[in-house]
Amino acid sequence: MGIRVGIDSGGTFTDVMTIGEDGRVHSVKVASTPQNPALGFEDGLQKALSLLGLSPSQLEIILHGTTVAINAIIERRFPEVALITTEGFRHILEIARQTVPGERGSIYHWVKPPRVVPLERVYEITERISASGEVIVPLDQEQVRNLARQLKAEGIEVAAVSLINSYANTRHEDQIRRILLEEHPSLFLATSSETLCEFREYERTLTTCINAVLMPLVSSYLNALSHRLQELGGKSPLFVMKSAGGVVTADRAAAQPLSTALSGPAAAVLGMAWLGRQSGFENIISFDMGGTSTDVALIESGRLPITPEAELDIHTVRAPTVDVISIGSGGGSIAGIGPADRVTVGPRSAGASPGPACYGQGGEEPTVTDAHLVLGRIPAFLVGGEIQLDPELAHAAVTRFGKKLGLSVEEAAEGILEIAAFNMSDAIRQVSVRRGRDPHDFALFALGGAGPLHACRLAQLLEIPTVVVPSHPGLGCALGLLVADVKDDFLITAIHREDQFDFPRLNRQFADLEARATASLEQQNIPAAQREFLRGADLRYQGMASELTVPVPNGEMGPEKAKQMLDNFHQAHHDNYGYSYQGQQLVESVNLRVSAVGLLPHLEPRPIAAGEADPEAALTGQRKVFFEEVRNFVECPLYQRSELKAGNRLTGPAVIEQYDTNTVVHPGQTLGVDALGNLVITIPRK
């Protein structure tokens, strides 16, 4: 088996994990380069290959998680775009939906955000297709041709096409695509029938527009990566992680860039679901705290949590996405004082530049990292000594902050960490308590460069009994890349009521979806023996406005398989809402789905060497560390993670140090090392 590499470009660090031919895992971290993420990608790859004494030509596969799409959305860095729609529907983005975000009362002060496409760039085309797919008014092809010439003359390089009922019949959108590209070959073009072949015209149109504006940015980035890899002598295919927890080739990702918006968080959750299955934990709360944000997800019975839509900045788009709650809380989160002396921690972040005050790069405001350094939670360096920290600068920043509040430097640092902890505990409650799940029934998997520093305190606050820290917690996203399969998703709107199932039509629709899925895997060079197809359906009780996605059995659909599908829905409704209307209310399908899966070689779990219970061989020294439980500094033993053996046990307080993070074990908590090298920490209940 060849060399595989996973590269995740985060906001602060770019993480690289490689699997050698012997199956061993190697990892490196380098500083990200937000202005040009390709530089951080190349730097990380070169560093990893240098450590292994390899060249790019020896790589079998490269898997990549990128923030290019989400950064463009957050920064609203969009090129000028045209929207082409059906005559009479020019104001589709202006009207949007009546829902006003926020609490009651928001209606009085909420201001509608700017549209992705300004009204003057929305163009109406003469055509009409009915909701059943019949052509009522033929497409005016000459009108389309004139519009294509106009866009080209005006220098418009990006366009979206969303006709009112194109989900029922793609004929007119297909014709528009052909004409536009004949007249304007360099046009970046997204059609709604290819982006989201679903009813709900506003969501379909918005999703198509955002997909279109991301095309030049993401395709330019991926083309630059592919070109640079070729210059370096690399011949391996480049795969990109999607928000739904699978990878596709760079060409597919460039054509559907919106699908990569949350690739980093998705990779981390995918990695934790895999690791949980290997380690005997199926119910997991994934807690990933990096330099700028924290991502939280809930995994039940080992299943990846997938939602059909995502909140991206001010936009709600329809795209399969791993269900993750993200908040602005990370190691670089800045502590500030607002009105009425209200202390805040985040969402403002020092980022990678200038970074926390202790980086010595000009930052003067105190951050979470500075507070950890003041309290002895971390040493005076990060990433194995590659980033040196200045304790005096951290002390000065936190002292200035504390004086404004009449607090000592220790009290101020503790307060910063406690506020950050309560912010993150609220995010965990959002994915658990607010969805009817008790955190006590889950294990908290700590990821990211800062996750293991906070996890044990969060477990105390939420009464979570177990914390698990993987072998490479600071590279959780890169780990997820190495256990990913190719996955491409296809759907169509198909209304079927349970008492009127048209099975021949239902089977034709699934066959059409599977034909598209097969073509995708063929395009990505996945051998037939490595292909799988997963069916699903969006179902709802008749008359309801929202639906749930449930699995559908493979094979010819008939009454028996339809009953299995309906039973899956009733159970899912009960699991999500605490009740079902089985036998009381008719069920109808809204959308049919097929996921094309191409099986890739995965990382194989490797047991670590076993040892005695006493971890003394890993003891490297002591340091004074401040703990909330004793309200003071205590002499805390320090252990080197790489020297711990399976079976080692210890009782806190303790700090476990390693290349990519540090794990803080609080007084009274017990830690054991399992066969795969995970730190399994037991949190006593108060």
Image (spheres, helix red, strand yellow):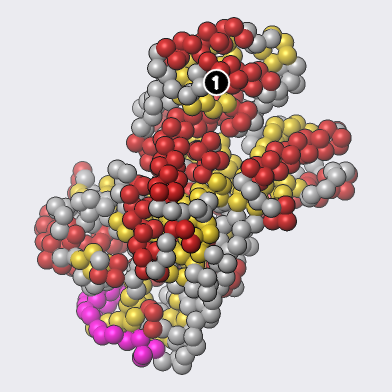
Q: Is residue 268 visible?
A: no
Please name whichever residue, 451 or 528, is drawn nearer the observer in this view of the structure.
Answer: 528
Horizontal side, residue 395 vs residue 424: left or right: left
What secondary structure is the stretch in magenta mostly built from?
A: strand
Horizontal side, residue 474 vs residue 59: left or right: left
- Which residue is found at the position 43% from the left and 50% from the top? 229
Please name whichever residue, 424 or 189, is drawn nearer the observer in this view of the structure.
Answer: 189
- Which residue is found at the position 49% from the left and 73% from the top? 24
Please name whichever residue, 225 or 658, is drawn nearer the observer in this view of the structure.
Answer: 225
Q: Is residue 205 visible?
A: yes
Image coordinates for residue 424, horizontal then vertical, percent = 39, 57
Amino acid at the residue labelled 1: Leu
Please provide the residue range marked out in magenta. Answer: 615-634
Residue 206 higher or lower than 39, as above or below: above
Image coordinates for residue 8, horizontal then vertical, percent = 42, 54
Horizontal side, residue 262 vs residue 281: left or right: left
Q: Quadrant of the N terminus?
A: bottom right
